[in-house]
Amino acid sequence: MTAMPCGRRSEDLLRLAADGPAADPDLARHARACPHCGPELARLDNHWDDVRAAAATPPPAPPGLAERMVDVLRGVRGTGGTYHGVAEGVRVADHVVVMVVRRVAADAVAGLGHVRAVRTEADTIHIGLAVRYGVAADALAERVRASVLAGLAERVGPVATGVDVRVVDVVPPPIG
Ligand SMILES: [Zn+2]
């Protein structure tokens, strides 16, 4: 607790500044006449004005944020991260493309491995394959690549100009 030279407590002045004169009419009356409490209350009032203004005003966006957002959105449109344009006025959601790719790739793998990951980027579909041990990984990857290109063109439209297949894992052969 801090006492003013007149004996009043600065905490009470702070509460008065925060809650208004009605919170403590006696102290408010005293502060109007007291050479110590008056200036202190005015100072605290100014401070609370700042706090109230800060609370009422949304924080300013960091410099460059708007520009970065526009860049991000432009990137999304450009790469088809959300939608893929397949014809004039026709767009296909990215998750639809990913589902189709997963299905087509899984059919092409045909039990010789697993589709581990599918993601789209720009005009390229990236597929991560786990290949069963003993299977020729390059031949399988190429079959998946060709199947996905053809399957997309047939089922969705001209979504991707490239399919990038990577063998990311090897799984043991089936028991028996
Ligand atoms: Zn005073």
Image (cartoon, grey):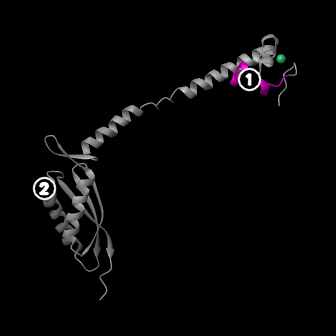
Q: Find the magenta span and give its range.
A: 8-22
In the image, taking residue 66 as reference, residue 140 lies left or right, namely left
> Regarding ligand 1, which quadrant of the image does it lie in?
top right
- The residue at 24%/78% (across/down) is 135
- Counting from the top left corner in percent of width and height, residue 2 is at 83, 28
- Counting from the top left corner in percent of width and height, residue 127 is at 26, 61
Q: Name which residue type carries label 1.
A: Ala
Quarter of the figure with the C terminus: bottom left
Label 2 environment density (alpha carbons within 10 Å; few <14, some 14–19, many ≥20): some
Dominant SS in magenta: helix
Determine contact: label 1, label 2, CB under 8 Å: no
In the image, taking residue 29 as reference, residue 141 lies left or right, namely left
Residue 151 higher or lower than 18, as above or below: below
- Counting from the top left corner in percent of width and height, residue 69 is at 37, 36
Q: In the rendered image, which quarter is residue 151 located in?
A: bottom left
- The residue at 81%/18% (across/down) is 26
Residue behind mark 2: 153
Quarter of the figure with the N terminus: top right
Q: In the rendered image, which quarter is residue 15 located in?
A: top right
The answer to whether residue 112 shows anywhere in this view is yes
Q: Which mark is residue 64?
A: none
Residue behind mark 1: 23
- Counting from the top left corner in percent of width and height, residue 140 is at 20, 71
- The residue at 26%/51% (across/down) is 94
